[in-house]
Image (cartoon, helix red, strand yellow):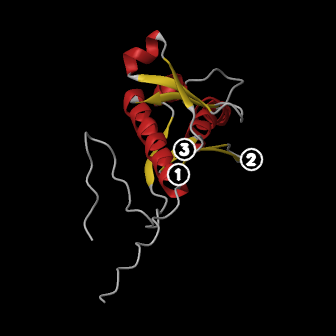
């Protein structure tokens, strides 16, 4: 069996009747630029600890400085990073999946086969970074918002291709199979 051909850069489609496994197309997180302030706080805290360690006034002790620095790092560096790390978007050949939550996990998905509109919104800073926000809406479910996605043009193209391929496959699979050929006339 040969691989089906692709015309004009379109994704491959499986042969009629062949099983279509769900494959991961892309997995990504929001743009990491939102962690810039956390990195600045981490650097400033480390610098302040290095400068003030051993040089504190009489009522304060070094362990107090380290405890305050640890609390600042936990609240302003570790928690924002964990929140960013836990919010993952996955595009497969069948659906778009959003998983988020550090302590309580939240899961949303949207099937390609139902079709949806793709709305792109890019602010000035997002354009500078090559990022953007996608809103996927199928008209029935609440819209799925993919915020601050890096390489927004590439993600948009992948989503449009997956919707097209899934709708073609759904239409093709909904058609009745070819009828059997008529019997050949018997030689008399």
Q: Which residue is drawn at 40% across and 72% down?
A: 181
The x and y percentages for residue 116 are 57, 34
Residue at the outermost front position: 188
Alpha-carbon span between mark 1 and mark 3: 10 Å
CB atoms of marks 2 and 3 within 8 Å: no
Q: Name the residue under label 3.
A: 112
Mark 3, Cα crowd under 10 Å, few <14 / some 14-19 / many 20+, is: many
Q: Residue at x 46, y 38 (%)?
A: 159
Residue 130, which numbered label?
A: none
Task: State which tag comes first along the sequence, 1 or 2.
Answer: 2
Task: State which tag comes first along the sequence, 1 or 3.
Answer: 3
Q: Can residue 23 be seen in this view?
A: yes
| Quadrant of the rendered image containing residue 23 | bottom left
Quadrant of the frame with the C terminus: bottom left
Task: State which tag comes first along the sequence, 2 or 3.
Answer: 2
Element at badge 2?
loop
Left or right, 186 with reference to 24: left
CB atoms of marks 1 and 2 within 8 Å: no
Q: Mark 2 points at which residue?
A: 104
Q: Residue at x 45, y 43 (%)?
A: 162
- Residue closer to the observer: 170 or 174: 174
The x and y percentages for residue 34 are 52, 25
Element at badge 1?
helix
| Quadrant of the rendered image containing residue 144 | top right
Instruction: Give the vertical position of 100 relative to 69 (above or below).
Output: below
Element at badge 3?
loop
Quadrant of the frame with the N terminus: bottom left
Left or right, 6 with reference to 42: left
């Amino acid at each position: 069996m040969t691989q089906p051909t692709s015309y004009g850069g379109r994704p491959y489609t499986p042969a009629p009747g062949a099983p279509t496994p769900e494959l991961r197309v892309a997995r990504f997180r929001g743009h990491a630029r939102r962690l810039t302030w956390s990195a600045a706080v981490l650097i400033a805290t480390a610098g302040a600890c290095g400068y003030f360690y051993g040089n504190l006034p009489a009522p304060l002790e070094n362990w107090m400085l380290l405890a305050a620095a640890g609390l600042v790092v936990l609240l302003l560096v570790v928690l924002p990073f964990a929140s960013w790390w836990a919010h993952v978007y996955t595009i497969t050949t069948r659906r778009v999946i959003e998983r988020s939550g550090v302590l309580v996990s939240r899961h949303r998905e949207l099937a390609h086969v139902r079709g949806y509109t793709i709305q792109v919104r890019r602010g000035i800073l997002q354009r500078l970074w090559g990022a953007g926000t996608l809103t996927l809406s199928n008209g029935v479910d609440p819209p799925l918002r993919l915020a601050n996605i890096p390489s927004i043009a590439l993600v948009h193209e992948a989503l449009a291709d997956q919707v097209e391929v899934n709708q073609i496959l759904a239409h093709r699979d909904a058609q009745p199979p070819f009828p059997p050929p008529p019997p050949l006339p018997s030689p008399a």
